[in-house]
Image (cartoon, helix red, strand yellow):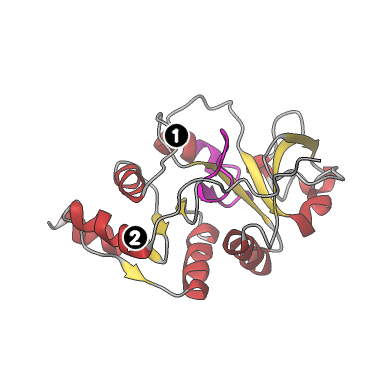
Amino acid sequence: KLSMPSPYLGKCYSDNQIIQAFKDKGLPIPKRLDKKDLVSNVVKVLTDGGVVAWFQGASEFGPRALGNRSFLADPRFDSIREVINQKIKKRELFRPFAPSCKEESMSKFFQINQKSPYMNVVAKVHEDKKKDIPAVTHIDGTARIHTVNKQVNPLYWELLDNFESKTGVGVLLNTSFNIQEPIVENPSQAIECYLKSSVDCLAIGPFICDSEWRLKVDLL
C-alpha cells in the first residue's frame, strides 16, 4: 500500500541562505530567535489580532499551504477574514478560509474521524464550537480541515500547541503565502511578498521581521 505521510517534499533553505536573501536585497538582517521565543512572539502577534507570514522548513507538495508557506491568523476573530481578503489576499469576500488544527484537537472542534494532512476533507464544525472559530467556519457550518501531526511538522504543531495553551483553541486560520501569484517558494519571494503586504510580521526560519524591522527598512 502506497503511503505518503508527509506533504513537505519541496526544497528547504538554510539559515545562511535566508540571511543571503536579505543581503542581496540590501535589507537589514532581522532578529534571530530560538525556537521557543520565535513561537511565543508569533503567538503574541496572532492573539493581538495580527496576521503572520510563516515561512518554515521544506515547501509543501500540492496546491495547499500546509503550515510551511502560510499566512496565519487567529480564527476567533470573525473580522480577520475581511482584513486578509481586503488588505492581503485581494480576493472576493465570500471565499472561506481553512483551519489548521492539531490532530489531538480535531474531534473537539470538527465532526471528523480521520486525519486530513492535505487539507482535502470537509467536515461540519461542532455547533457549540462555531462561536469559537468563526473565521474558519463557512456559511454552511463546514470547514476544510488541515490536521497537523507532531512528528511530521513539529514546529507548526508547537505553534498550534502554544496558541492553544494561551487561548484554549488549538486551531489557526491558515491560507497560502501569496498575493495573487503562486505560493512563495524561496526566501527572496517570501521577503518580497511580505514587504508588499500589510502583514504584521514575517517569521522566516529563526528570524522575525516585525514593525521594528520595517521601520529600519523605511529609513533606508
Q: Is residue 165 left or right of residue 194?
A: right
Q: Position of residue 118 (x, y in %)?
A: 67, 40
Residue ID for mark 2 = 209
Residue ID for mark 1 = 89
Secondary structure under the numbered disc 1 in the rendered image: helix
Residue drawn at point x = 65 percent, y = 41 percent: 136
As displayed, is residue 200 above or below residue 127?
below
Is 6 within the magenta? no
Question: Quadrant of residue 216 in the image?
Answer: bottom left
Is 79 within the magenta? yes
Residue neighbourhood size for the residue with mark 2, other residues' Cα within 10 Å, grouped as few (<14), some (14–19), many (≥20): many
Q: What residue range appears in magenta?
A: 60-83
Circle 1: residue type: Lys
Asked if residue 208 shows in the view, the reply is: yes
Disc number at residue 103? none
Circle 2: residue type: Cys
Asked if residue 70 shows in the view, the reply is: no
Q: Quadrant of the C terminus?
A: bottom left
Residue neighbourhood size for the residue with mark 1, other residues' Cα within 10 Å, grouped as few (<14), some (14–19), many (≥20): many
Q: Is residue 136 left or right of residue 27?
A: right
How far is the residue under mark 2 from the one under mark 1?
20 Å
Q: Is residue 124 left or right of residue 13?
A: right
Q: Position of residue 68 (x, y in %)?
A: 52, 51
Q: Earlier in the sequence, mark 2 or mark 1?
A: 1
